[in-house]
Image (cartoon, grey):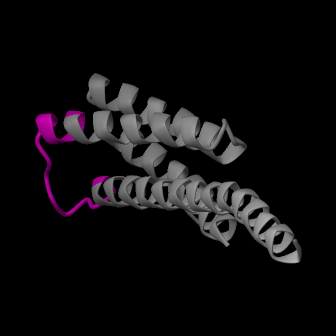
Amino acid sequence: MLRKSIHGALILLLLCALPASAQRRDRVRKAERIRSDASHLAAVLDDLQYQRVRFTDNVWRTSANEALALANRLYDETGGRADARNARAHIRQMRTAVLRGNLAAARNHAQQALPYVHALSDWAYNRRR
């Protein structure tokens, strides 16, 4: 009889532990996805600030669209955190400046968005633990 109750207790313990480990695994995966998107976005924004290379209008437009897509995804993945909201606002302004041909303003907005993107990456790294 004691053996059956020990078996039952072990099974119950395993059934309770599995959802908890799955939730942690999902949280870690989400944090890694946020860090990956933030790193990718930071690289795009950093590339656009490099003034020694003359990018074509197509490269600017494509990069601005990619940055906006990543910023939107970060905003959704973080639940609308203030850093994600601010980064997305600057990237929207950057994209608008690119579409108008004002590349100096676009570089400026890319530079202003970078600290928020780095803050999101740091937040995701600390959340992962």
Q: Position of residue 55 (x, y in %)?
A: 14, 48
Q: Which residues are magenta?
A: 48-61
Residue drawn at (46%, 55%) of the image: 33
| Viewer-nearest residue: 7 or 43 | 7
In this picture, residue 95 sits left or right of residue 88: left
Q: Position of residue 127 (x, y in %)?
A: 68, 64
Q: Position of residue 101 (x, y in %)?
A: 26, 29
| Viewer-nearest residue: 1 or 36 | 1
Question: Is residue 4 inside the magenta stretch?
Answer: no
Q: Count the numbered circles shown.
A: 0
| Viewer-nearest residue: 11 or 71 | 11
Tell me the quarter of the image containing the N terminus: bottom right
Question: Is residue 56 inside the magenta stretch?
Answer: yes
Occupied quadrant, residue 86: top right
Residue drawn at (46%, 30%) of the image: 92
Q: Is residue 61 above or below residue 22?
A: above
